[in-house]
Amino acid sequence: MALVAASALARIEKQGELRWAGDLQGGEPYVYRDPVDPRRLDGFEVEIAAGIARRLGVRATFVQNDWSNLLPSLARGDFDVALNGIEDTPVVRAQALVTRPYFVFSEQLVVRRGFPLRTLAALRGHRVGTLASSLAHTILRDTPGIEVVLYSGQEEPYRDLALRRIDAVLLDSLIAERYGLTNPALEVADTDVARGTYVAAVRRGEADLRDALNRALDDMEARGELSAIFAKYHLPPQPALPNAAAADQRAHFDAAQLVLFLRGALVTLFVSLLAMSLAIPLGLVLALTRIYGGAVARFSSHCYVELFRGTPVLLQLYLLYYGLAPIVHLDALTAAILGLGMNYGAYEAEVHRAALGAIPAGQGEAAAALGLTRWQQLRLVLLPQALRTALPAMTNDLISLLKDSSLVSVITVVELTKQMTITAVDVRSWALPGLACAAMYFAMSYPLARLAARLEARLGYPEVPGALQESAA
């Protein structure tokens, strides 16, 4: 054990840098890009990391990492220290060694101005937003009757609160003051729901590095450097530190967790099927417009298809849910279904267009010779053949949509993949939750594939085509 511990500082000294990680999405005042010079990082944790590195005789190097995955990435060895508003909780201590606290905060409950419910107990039956895997998330889960709405960013919950999508937000006082209370429509209902502290985290077995960080933080505090940093970024004066984190209470991957997984799987299936139910007719209309419409209609359809195929579906979800919020107030599930349906509609348009193009021209000519109108030709002759041809591609797209539905977690929908990440943090393991998640995706997608294969066979497309026949000599 001593050899492992002794190697941590030696490794850092040898590489000449302290690689510390945070998430730029956390923004001001933690770590963010200097608005004057975007090549430079700013933030009170940037200066704390620089102060620690100076005392270790190395330079500080920032590594961007998603906040919710900081500790798993730390355990993988992607960087040396995680330092980005990491809260001192039993869950964190079970995964890493933590330093002494360097910042004390309170959990603040923010509501719309004049909202009558002012405590967590009074909010039972209401929707309360917070960040996933945070101390506030743990508090809300332990409060019976509250519907927890999870976000990946700290500005979005307050925006949804102002738009009445949720009824309250519980987050750190630092976040509440910078991102919530700047909106005059919001106010603090409870200034001190709970207390917490920020700590830095290092890998287990690297106690010497943890101790070196503690010495550096002690020296920065003794010299008044920490106070000066806090004052520079207009952070509140620091009260006395709370007691150490409570003893570890490890969660287990049990039947209760499986119930949550099943609930997430049902949300995934619900969103996917409804989105595909929108995408197929939308794609068919777009395809028909591109082939048979006038010049303006053809151009408009072409622009729609290229726009939705040429931009990420994640961006489209953000714009639909957050960007259009001042104009159209969509709930999360509706936005998820519309976003995925509109995106996949563009792909289905190309599937249908190719299927219609594969029909021999003589089919349409024969139908016209029989005196059928254009609509009758499409309805009775062309579309039935085209849909048979398009069926394998549509099946493949439905299975792809089932997996792409994991993206809707960015707009607060807790589907299967999001539930897996939450459970992985709770039980401090990614292997078993990940395997269970994969098994559930397979259990949903495989029956769909088999059902589609049977349907194709009934329509004249056997799953295994016959062997090629030799030509007659």
Image: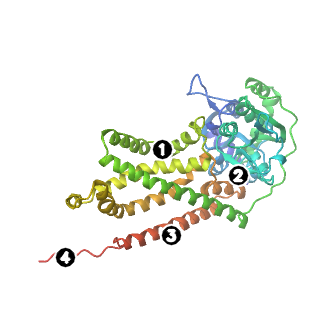
Label placed on residue 447: 3
Label placed on residue 217: none
Disc with the residue nearer the chain's start (4 vs 3): 3
Q: Are marks 2 and 1 in contact (CB under 8 Å)?
A: no
Residue behind mark 2 = 3
Q: How packed is label 3: few (under 14 Cα within 10 Å), some, or many (20 or more)?
A: few
Q: Are marks 4 and 2 in contact (CB under 8 Å)?
A: no
Which amino acid type is shown beneath numbered disc 2? Leu
Of circles 4 and 3, which is in front?
A: 3
Which amino acid type is shown beneath numbered disc 4? Glu
Of circles 3 and 1, which is in front?
A: 3
Label placed on residue 470: 4
Disc with the residue nearer the chain's start (4 vs 2): 2
Residue 37 is at least partly visible in this image: yes
Which amino acid type is shown beneath numbered disc 3? Pro
The secondary structure type at the circle numbered 2 is: helix
Disc with the residue nearer the chain's start (2 vs 3): 2
Residue sticking out furthest to the front: 371
Whether residue 36 is situated above or below residue 366 in the rendered picture = above
Of circles 2 and 3, which is in front?
A: 3
Residue 455 location (% of width, % of height): 41, 70
The secondary structure type at the circle numbered 4 is: loop
Q: Identify the residue at image location x=71%, y=58%.
A: 427
Spatial CA span between label 4 and label 1:
47 Å
Spatial CA span between label 4 and label 2:
71 Å
Q: How packed is label 1: few (under 14 Cα within 10 Å), some, or many (20 or more)?
A: few
Residue sticking out furthest to the bottom: 473
